[in-house]
Amino acid sequence: MKALFRWLSSYWTILRRPSVHYSLGFLTLGGFIAGIIFWGGFNTALEATNTEQFCISCHEMESNVYVELQDTIHYTNRSGVRATCPDCHVPHQWTDKIARKMQASKEVWGKIFGTINTRDKFLEKRRELAEHEWARLKANDSLECRNCHNFEFMDFTRQSQRARQMHSTALASGQATCIDCHKGIAHRLPDMSGVKGWE
Amino acid sequence: MRSLPLLLVLLASLAHAADYPLDAPAPDGRRPGGTLSQERATPPLAEDENKDLKRERNYPEQPPTIPHTIRGYQVDKNGNKCLTCHSRSNSAKTQAPMISITHYMDRDGQTLAAVSPRRYFCTQCHVPQQEVKPLVGNDFRTIDQLLQDEVQRAGQQQ
């Protein structure tokens, strides 16, 4: 313990002592430039992992969930606006995004150890994976849906009668959030037995 | 002499062509006009009607048609999207018509606790409608019209 303390305090004295060889200007400017490079590089790498190309570079994503997305209105529709994987699965706010990215390290683990590397394994795990996403969207009040579908700007007169009825009551009062009713809109559903509303 | 069969075939096909023109007029189906070898422009796909208004049934036993779009509705062994509104337990909340008691019966008329498997796949009987003109004429007369005819005939005989 004493040896460890001595070893640490030797580093502490180096940090405390003024620099002998390098000027203050060099250190300040150098630190500044290194900071830009580090921060820029970090964000670039982060954004690179936040693209659909990155997501479907794994066959688990490409041949299961991405294929299913292609039939849905979030992939192809009359106006050509579409959602990519991170639009729904990664928060847009920076802090939330970092939190989600840290959680995603579990997914890297899964990739390395082949947790869902066959179709059968994927189908077996689908309910669990879906439940994670339902729980996440329920907890953040369907934040990723609302990034595009803003309740404030919904025109009920342009909605069909039954959409208007549900949106103007349950959704408006905050009793329900998007994911409560709109499950399985972008991917196929797992076995829904026991899920609320699907009995 | 070797080419005799070939010659015969050629003659036969010529005679055939005279009787039946190869480029016969096409039947008036979805792409009316033209001939069999011509390629006509594809008619545009019609959109599903989405008015949420119940339609009249043409006879009492007719499965009601679906008055809304059902794009992306999943109905398989994992789940049934239709039943999330039309099931017994959900119809009060959504105000959607509940599926009738016949959907809970097996083919011997025994009532089951849950939807009978033979009635599970909704689109086997219930379908959305599109705003298109019928391709062929239809002179179907409803039972009401038949009854009215009967009454009129009876009136004429008196």
Image (cartoon, helix red, strand yellow):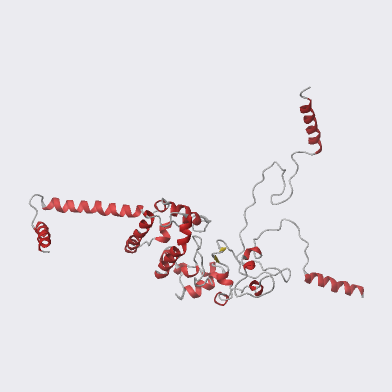
In screen coordinates, is A121 left or right of B16? left
Above or below, A85 relative to A150? above
The quarter of the image holding the N terminus of chain B is: top right
Q: Quadrant of residue B16?
A: top right
Q: Quadrant of residue A91?
A: bottom left
Residue A36 falls left or right of residue B97:
left
Q: Is residue B59 visible?
A: yes
Residue at the far top in the pictured view: B1
Query: Residue B70 appears at what percent x and percent y?
Result: 58, 63
Residue B116 pos. (x, y %): 62, 70
Q: Position of residue A90 (x, y in %)?
A: 38, 60
Which quadrant would the C terminus of chain B be assigned to in this image? bottom right
At a point 79% along the width and 32% down the height, the residue shown is B14
What residue is drawn where x is 76% and y is 28%?
A: B6
Out of A3 and A154, give the one closest to the viewer: A3
- The total of numbered circles placed on residues is 0
**Residue in front for this viewpoint, A8 or A183:** A8
Residue A133 point in image, percent of width and height: 43, 65
Residue at 28%, 51% in the rendered image: A41
